[in-house]
Image (cartoon, grey):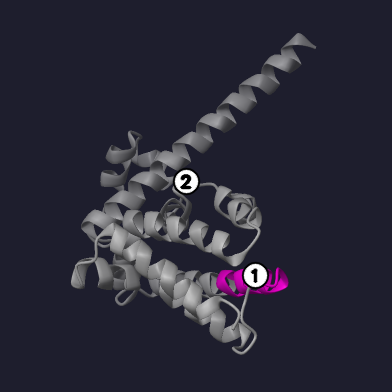
Amino acid sequence: MPERKKRTYDNSRRSAQARLTRAEVHRAAFRLFGEQGYAATSLPQIAAAAGVSVETVRKMGPKSGLLDGAREVAVFDESGVDEVLDTTFLRSVAAQEDLAGAVEVLVDFYATSNHRAAAFWQAWRAAAAGDPVVAAAWEREMASAHGAFRTGIAYAAGRGWLREDVSAEELAATLWVLAASETYTRLTVDAGFTDDDYRSWLRRMLLEQLAPR
């Protein structure tokens, strides 16, 4: 019996170490894709940045396979998200009593995540133009994002937070555009918005576009 307990402990420890290693690789891939571009980033560079062997990275699959884990870092600042609905962000939204409270959560989340990840999203989109595998991954990501915004709008409508003179599909598309990293980049890079400027703009636009009339 003691030996069985020890084996269980050892397996649990190895599993925890494997999860930590995957997280480090995904975080390294996220950073390097954003800094250098997808095509210019090699598996040896990712391995060096993660502090692991190249063979360890190769065992996780092709470079394109790292995009999903890197995406989780981009969105949630962590990898290995088993259940999106169990994230701190969505629990915070669900805890709000009205649209104004939910908007504050959204503003903080998107200002933070876009600041962290805008370069990564730009790199992924650019790489998709010249790589069919990356393009397919991008299309899946966009479909997933669209679905997430639809789900968010359905939830908010169920709470009675939203206007009813605009379709749910249009509200989801509006929220998607307002929260997009491309919009963040246009405002903060091209228009010179500060972080406070962006937060104020996003807060105002979300309330104007979503609140009941």
| Residue 185 falls inside the magenta stretch | no
Q: CA distance from mark 2 to mark 1?
A: 25 Å
Taking 149 as reference, is 38 above or below it? Answer: above
Amino acid type, label 2:
Glu
The answer to which of 84 and 88 lies nearer the viewer is: 88
The answer to which of 207 and 6 lies nearer the viewer is: 207
The residue positioned farthest toward the front in the image shown: 213
Please give the label number shown on residue 156. Answer: 1
Q: Residue at x 31, y 58 (%)?
A: 196
Amino acid type, label 1:
Ala
Answer with the quarter of the image where residue 188 lies: bottom left
- Residue named by callout 2: 78
On-image quarter of the N terminus: top right
Ranked by sequence position, the earlier of labels 2 and 1 is 2
Taking 62 as reference, is 166 above or below it? Answer: below
The part of the chain drawn in magenta is: 148-160
Camera sees residue 171: yes
Please give the label number shown on residue 204. Answer: none
The answer to whether residue 162 is left or right of residue 112 is right
Tag 2's secondary structure? Answer: loop
